[in-house]
Amino acid sequence: MRLERKTALITGGGGMGGAQARLFAREGAAICVADLFLEKAQLVAKEIDTSGARALAVSHDVRRAVPSMRRGGGGVITGSMLTVDGGAAL
């Protein structure tokens, strides 16, 4: 697993970023799935969790600063930050 002990923040994770979130999870990364629509992020995060990887869903509008993120579920993901992906449409 090439990305073990890494964390990836994927924006647009409920849409096109979902494929990247799944790929990074298969490689061992913990995933923070961020999307404007929390329900979409939660579906991807649940799928990743079911596969045995770690994922957290958050609601986030990429037009706003990072502190606008609201957790959509319990749990905390730790590890060194691997990437902040701009999968969300701006």
Image (cartoon, rainbow, N blue to C red):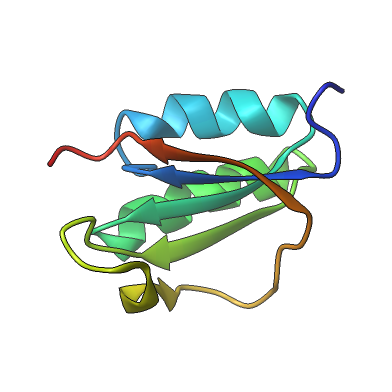
Which residue: 85% across, 44% down?
5
83 to 42, vertically: above or below: above
In-front residue for pair 10/64: 64
- Position above or below: 16 against 9: above
Task: Give the percent coordinates (x, y) of residue 64.
Answer: 20, 67
Is residue 45 rendered to the left or right of residue 35?
right
Image point (79%, 33%), residue name: 28
> Is 67 rendered above or below residue 81?
below
Q: Residue drawn 33% across and 60% down? A: 39
Provide residue 89's location: percent of width, then percent of height. Answer: 16, 37
User: Where does the image place residue 27, in percent across and percent down from the top left?
Assistant: 75, 24
Judge by depth and name the residue closer to the eye, 80 or 23.
80
Q: Quadrant of residue 76?
A: bottom right
Instruction: Name the image quarter holding the C terminus.
Output: top left
Q: Tell me: 14 left or right of 4.
A: left
Instruction: Count the marks.
Output: 0
Q: Quadrant of the N terminus?
A: top right
User: Which of 4/16 is in front?
Assistant: 4
Left or right for 12, reference 33: left
User: Could you tell whether 15 is left or right of 83 in the image?
Assistant: left
